Amino acid sequence: MQEEKPNQENFFESIKNSPMTDADLLIAPQLLQGIKMLELGKVEDAFGVFKDASALSPKSFKALYLLGRTAMELEQFDDAVPALKAALELEPGNIEVQYLIAHVHALQDLVEEAAGELLAILGKNPDFIDAYYDCGVALQILGRYQEAIKIFEKRLSFSPDFETAIMCAMTYEIILDYENTEKYYAQAMALDPENIMVVESHGKTLLELERYEEALKDFNAALALDPESPDALCGRGQTLFHLGNTEDALKDLKATVRLDPENMIAWGMLGQIKLYEEDYEKALKYLEKAIEIDPDLLVYDFRASAKRALGDLEGALADIKLAIEFEPENVDYLIDEGIILIQMERIDEALKVFNEVLLREKTPEAYRFRGLAFMKELEYEKAIADFTEAEKLGEEAPDLFLNRGEAFYQLGEQEKGMADFQRAKKLAEEEGNVEFAKKCESFLKKMSE
């Protein structure tokens, strides 16, 4: 567990100016010698002096305190903890020594122990500012995110602090609270506006919040600081895609993978853009590269779409099942699975999937595609019922009305069928889908013969 070292401001002066006990006086020359070495940066030499001094006068608080603190600086924790505990026995109420012991435990990755000690310190001494950062970090590592946030925010209520603001933002980010994540990254950015990591993180958060114009400003600011930052280029590429500028988005994302060939986010975005452009071969290539780098990257649904478009239905089904494994509550993935099963003529399986979706959530898409599955089974009345439910829920897809019109036609309800074909044709024309409008027109001619 990486922590910032305790504040050393006025450290040497406070030791030199504090009252001397009889035990301190026995070794006063050694103490002054060791402090002088610390001031000169000779930490190892000072450690040796303090170790000898504490052996000569084991009741000297100053010797033990200085020995523990110097051992901590040298990351010799097995020496630091006993010395600090011995110092605490001499002065049980010394809050700084209590804090240093907790701090060393944190540095040793004894996180549970450190968190308990730091919470106890803050419970008795809520104004002891130095303990808040360490305590919040320990709680975050333990997964106690709400407690960590409370500690970080309490620290920030005293005064602005760059490191604490970042940690607070990161903790909110873990729990997907992007509004507060943005708030604290903005606070950190105000304290250090040229810190590229913070500017990029703020931009990524704005991207999550779909505040694309603001995100673009952040990524441009980051690139002004470092024109070859892969993270900033990747973030700007994602933002530009969401703003509809796919040409520049592709440039940024391709620049990202040139600079950072292992950037799976950029490869995944390249795949998504090519999927959007209906360049399925390239989409598949980029998405497979992203998954090769990180098999846990959640782009299996996109790869399923690419495979499906290329006619690899078995591969598409396998991918959408993987996506469902990662996010079993995602009904969109289940709907995609059902659609693929319909294309594979596995209608009974498709119906089971859509039934499961509708038990969870009454979506127009699920009704619409279950209706299509019923059409495949020639169950026209059930199909009409589902298409009608989809319409009630706001579905306006031309193919819904075309399919319902066909179902009415098969049941001999010519007037209703004609009305649906006309509606489908009108919607297709409004969308500029000339081929679909022609298809509707052919059905209308067939019915009027």
Image (tube, rainbow, N blue to C red):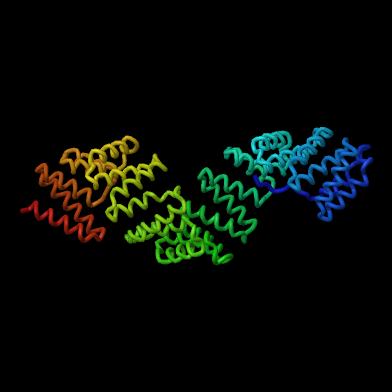
Residue 312 horizontal/vertical position (percent): 29, 52
Q: Residue at x 33, y 61 (%)?
A: 279
Q: Is any atom of residue 40 visible in this view?
A: yes
Tell me if 115 is positioned left or right of 173 in this view: right
Q: Residue at x 57, y 45 (%)?
A: 171
Tell me if 313 is positioned left or right of 22 in this view: left
Q: Is residue 401 above or below residue 261?
A: above
Q: Is residue 242 above or below residue 134?
A: below
Residue 178 horizontal/vertical position (percent): 51, 48
Tell me if 281 is positioned left or right of 43 in this view: left
Q: Residue at x 91, y 37 (%)?
A: 23
Quarter of the figure with residue 83:
top right
Q: Residue furthest left?
A: 449
Residue 398 horizontal/vertical position (percent): 23, 52
Residue 336 horizontal/vertical position (percent): 31, 46
Q: Is residue 334 above or below residue 292?
A: above
